[in-house]
Amino acid sequence: MGYAGGGARHGYDGWLTYCGPANGGLIALDSVEVDESMYPIIIESRGVVADTQGIGEFEGAPAVGGVFYPVDHEMTLVYSADGTTFPPRGVLGGGDAKASHSAKRGTDGKLVELPAFHEEACRAGERIEFVACGGGGYGDPTKRDVRRVAASVDRGWLTSEAARQSYKVALVLDAEQGVWVVDQDATARLRAA
């Protein structure tokens, strides 16, 4: 359904579909339609989760999260959620990524936290909710190119609030063009403080 993003390194942001070093970049993430046509499941949502990456001069990749459930039967789910207890660390001033998270929402609407490595039965009417961890950041966040911060917000990978708090970058929405632009004066004041 989803997997962890890669960590940043000097000169490069993290790789969104990294997963881990053992796969050598060969893991494929099926489309929702392919998975739903092969298995009796519904993938309610799957995508990037904003503000889950490690911040830094070079940004770790954000996490992928989602919700899925069986159509009308019991489904047994076997999974591993690396990065639940020890999320990827940032280095040289970079921030840590957010931890992985796995849970099951019961038919009563209550959310039950699940262990990091587990086999779980999901019955009709129940939903599995997950967030795979993002990647750790590299370097001082206040040295990140402000245009790259705005690009992360435009992609939906970072909120404008997190850009202001974590990167000290003030953004304003250009409603006509539908993109975030850097408020240079406010950013200079934030970064000087």
Image (tube, grey):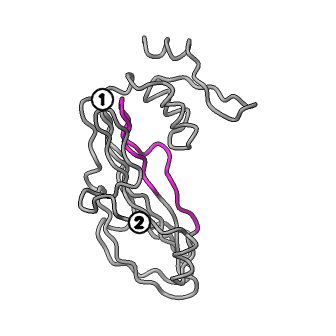
What range of the chain is rendered magenta? 44-64
Q: Which of the 4 image quadrants contains residue 192?
A: top left
Instruction: Give the label on residue 85, or none.
Output: none
> Does label 1 or label 2 sit earlier along the sequence?
2
Q: Secondary structure at mark 2?
A: loop
Q: Decide: is 165 above or below 43.
A: above
Residue closest to the far right: 176
Q: Is residue 49 magenta?
A: yes
What residue is disc 2 on?
A: 28
- Assign the C terminus to one quadrant of the image: top left
Q: Decide: is 170 above or below 150.
A: above
Instruction: Give the label on residue 139, or none.
Output: 1
Q: Amino acid at mark 2?
A: Ala
Q: Decide: is 174 above or below 33.
A: above
Observer-side mark, 1 or 2, equals 2
Residue at horizontal 55 percent and vertical 23 percent from the top: 170
Q: Is residue 103 left or right of residue 24?
A: right
Whole-percent x and y of residue 156?
56, 43
Q: Is residue 87 left or right of residue 127?
A: left
Q: Amino acid at mark 1?
A: Gly
Q: Which of the 4 image quadrants contains residue 109?
A: bottom right
Q: Which of the 4 image quadrants contains residue 92?
A: top left
**Residue nearer the viewer, 71 or 15:** 15
Residue at horizontal 56 percent and vertical 33 percent from the top: 160
Residue at horizontal 54 percent and vertical 84 percent from the top: 40
Q: Decide: is 117 above or below 22.
A: below
Dominant secondary-structure state across the stretch colored magenta: loop
Whole-percent x and y of residue 14?
36, 44
Q: Secondary structure at mark 1?
A: loop
For disc 1, the neighbor class at 10 Å (few under 14, some 14 to 19, many from 20) is: many
